[in-house]
Image (cartoon, helix red, strand yellow):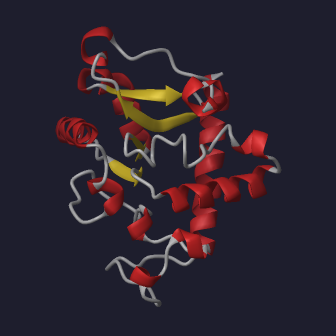
Amino acid sequence: MVLVAIVVAITMMVGSLARSLAAPSVGSAGTQAQDASAMTAADGVVTEADGAMPVGASAFDEQHPGIVNLDPDLLRALRDAASDAREDGVEFVVNSGWRSPDYQQQLLRDAVDEYGSEEEAARWVATAETSAHVAGSAVDVGSYDATDWLSEHGAGYGLCPIYDNEPWHFELHPEAIDQGCPAKYFDPTEDPRMQQ
């Protein structure tokens, strides 16, 4: 079961990387060929203003909306965990955090195109109305070492993995500090919050 989840996670990451390479990209200096302020996900182009993250973004970045628009308690817990993980030689990368509703809808449209149906896409991408990312209450952490470190130590910071099929997705559950993380759902279709 764990091996299947890892294979699925790797497949999703490769697919996401391929999509990001095919899409207009944000350069290392945060610039685009076109004026990013005039473009939004509603135009079909996702920018950093929508929460798109540049490759290698740190949990300590202060300039990216995808990080600074996270719930303050989640961001504090993430940064505390990242500081302690760094002492263990593990660096956190934030692949996704807060997202605009337009960005989330674009991700959902892309998932429907990729998986062929809304039902299958729902296993991977929430609607803008139900997404914890749009609410600023979820963060997708990379590298494998970071997700592994958080899976082992995250409860001590209130950071919990939510879905078996998305081992990189963490949300804040402050009660986990004393009680441990709640049981994970296999995928978002089992999460009652996604049924709204």
Number of marks in the rendered image = 0
Residue drawn at 57 percent across, 67 percent down: 20
Extreme-right residue of the structure = 116
Q: Position of residue 96 (x, y in %)?
A: 43, 52
Residue drawn at 60 percent across, 34 percent down: 6
Q: Going by the image, does 151 lie left or right of 120?
A: left
Q: Where is residue 7 in the image (x, y as percent from the top left)?
A: 65, 38
Residue 88 visible? The answer is no
Residue 166 higher or lower than 19, as above or below: above
Residue drawn at 27 percent across, 51 percent down: 59
Residue 80 visible? The answer is yes
Q: Going by the image, does 173 lie left or right of 73?
A: right
Question: Which quarter shows the C terminus?
Answer: top right
On the image, which quarter does residue 10 sit in? Answer: top right
Q: Where is residue 79 in the image (x, y as percent from the top left)?
A: 21, 42
Depth check: give the residue in front, 121 or 93.
121
Depth check: give the residue in front, 119 or 94.
119
Question: Which quarter shows the N terminus?
Answer: top right
On the image, which quarter does residue 195 sit in? Answer: top right
Q: Position of residue 41 (x, y in %)?
A: 54, 69
Extreme-top residue of the structure = 179
Depth check: give the residue in front, 172 or 6.
172
Residue drawn at 34 percent across, 31 percent down: 149
Residue 87 higher or lower than 178, as above or below: below
